[in-house]
Amino acid sequence: MKVELERLRENHPKIQAVVFASSQAQIRDQNPALNKWLWQLRDAIDEADDVLDEFEYMK
């Protein structure tokens, strides 16, 4: 579990950067499927934030 948590900590900012960059691009407006996937990715990021917060609290 420690390895997965560390991978989440490492990849979390990268995923957030991709979502932010794609949210700013006009691509999402031109591609409904991509827009739907980005919303799903945002939800996953929110869930990852919650998991990281819980582990930090438990520390």
Image (cartoon, rainbow, N blue to C red):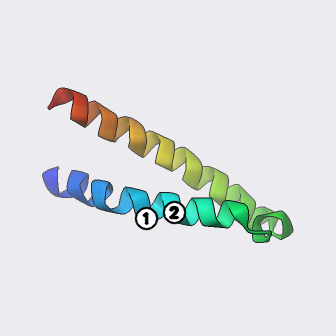
The extreme right residue here reads 30
Q: Which residue is mark 2?
A: 17
Q: Amino acid at mark 2?
A: Ala
Label 1: element kind: helix
Asked if residue 32 is positioned above or below residue 41 in the image, the reply reads: below
Residue 4's image quarter? bottom left
Q: Is residue 26 left or right of residue 19?
A: right
Q: Give the percent coordinates (x, y) of residue 12.
A: 39, 56
Number of disc labels: 2
Q: Which mark is residue 57?
A: none
Q: Residue at x 81, y 63 (%)?
A: 32
Q: CA distance from mark 2 to mark 1?
A: 5 Å
Label 2: element kind: helix
Q: Is residue 50 left or right of residue 58?
A: right
Q: Residue at x 75, y 64 (%)?
A: 33
Residue 34's image quarter? bottom right
Q: Residue at x 39, y 35 (%)?
A: 50
Q: Is residue 35 left or right of residue 2?
A: right
Q: Give the percent coordinates (x, y) of residue 28.
A: 76, 65
Q: Which residue is mark 1?
A: 14
User: Badge 2: few (under 14), some or many (20 or more) residues near its Cα, within 10 Å?
Assistant: few
The extreme top residue here reads 57
Q: Amino acid at mark 1?
A: Lys
Image quadrant holding the C terminus, namely top left
**Mark 2 touching mark 1, by CB under 8 A?**
yes
